[in-house]
Image (spheres, rainbow, N blue to C red):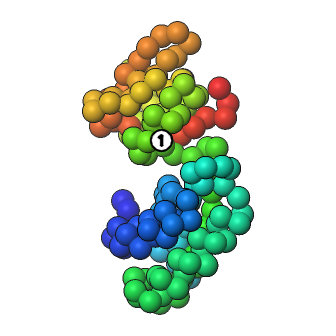
Amino acid sequence: MAHPLIPRIVTCAEPIAAELGLEVVDVVFQTNKKPPVLRIDVRNLSQDTGLEDCERFSRLLDPQLEAQEIIPGAYVLEVSSPGTDRNLTTDREFIAFRGFPVRVKTYAPYKDQKEWCGTLRERDEAAIHLNLKGKAIAIPRELVAKVQLDDQP
């Protein structure tokens, strides 16, 4: 379950990312660490995401988070790029990565499996559609725990 502060953090972070030509891909607030860790993954919309992108975003976001007092107490801010094994979550990502190898993990077994590896065909209202070596399968969305790009096709 996502931390309740994440929507406020996203609201603060997205305009800064947009100003820099970046997109906020994921936000995780790990309160089980001392101090807590706020990890934000960003992606450059026009080229590969680099360290400079993460640094620029961090330098602009940090003072805004402090000024708005969103997170009480000390915390560590980590900004990174999502990498190739990242989770797909947005409609935009599912469209952009159509035809790419993915790994789908389910909460409960579907057709006796909890993990599926195949080529992403699409995501619609009802299912994640994969091509498994020429065979089409539709995994119901309510069963899907996560969809990740798979670097092991």
Q: Quadrant of the N terminus?
A: bottom left
Q: Residues within 10 Å of mark 1 (few under 14, many from 20)?
A: few
Name above or below for residue 142 compared with residue 3: above
Q: Nearer the viewer, residue 115 or 117?
A: 117
Find disc 1 in the rendering and name its residue: 93
Q: Quadrant of the C terminus?
A: top right
Q: Is residue 91 left or right of residue 103?
A: left
Q: Residue at x 37, y 22 (%)?
A: 138
- Where is residue 129? Give x, y as percent: 41, 24
- Residue found farthest to the top: 134
In the rendered structure, which amino acid carries the disc numbered 1?
Answer: Glu
Name above or below for residue 2 compared with residue 103: below
Name above or below for residue 6 compared with residue 64: above
- Residue found farthest to the right: 51
The reply to whether residue 132 is visible in this rendering is yes
Name above or below for residue 96 compared with residue 53: above
